[in-house]
Amino acid sequence: MLIKEFYKTINLTSEETGIKATIELNPNHEVYKGHFPGQAVVPGVIQLQIVKEILENHLSKNLFMGNLNQVKYLRPIIPNQNQTIIFKINYSWEESKTLKTTVVVSALISSKEQIFTKAKINFSILF
């Protein structure tokens, strides 16, 4: 985990086309003192890092975030209001022209009531 004690995984399940993880945010984490004082918001880059960490754990592989094909931050994640977050991560494998294996990911970050972020990311496997 890149940022210790930022979140903990509550549930992780494999689905037909990917994985679904439910995490619980730590609303008292130090990160929120700078992002943003008075109105804590989960940084977008940390949201993408959590996607990477969940996928690495599931695949038992080290990944490198390559192309961010599309990222849409639809609404902020406010940790005091949204402590339980759901990550739906669909992925497929693709061989590239350079003979590197790419993991093509479509991620949806939400709570039960709202969608926060949608992302399409390509990861390379680090050997």
Image: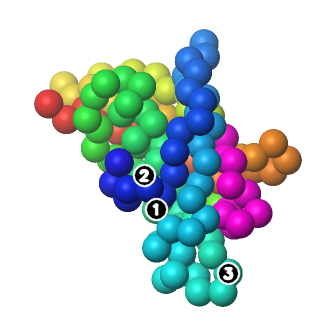
**Numbered tag placed on residue 45 in the rendering:** 1
Report the mark closest to the observer, 3 or 1: 3
Furthest-top residue in this view: 16
* Residue 81 falls inside the magenta stretch: yes
Residue at left offset 29%, top offset 38%: 63
Do the numbered discs 1 and 2 sit on residues whose CB atoms are within 8 Å?
yes
Residue 61 sits in quarter: top left
> Which residue is nearer to you in this view: 14 or 79?
79
Residue ID for mark 3: 39
What is the quadrant of the C terminus in the image?
Answer: top left
Residue 122 in view, yes or no: yes
Q: Taking 94 as reference, is 124 above or below it?
A: below
Q: Earlier in the sequence, mark 3 or mark 1?
A: 3
| Left or right, 19 with reference to 38 | left
> Which residue is nearer to you in this view: 94 or 112?
112
Residue at left offset 48%, top offset 57%: 6
Residue 86 sits in quarter: top right
Residue 104 sits in quarter: top left
Residue type, numbered disc 3: Gln
Residue ID for mark 2: 49
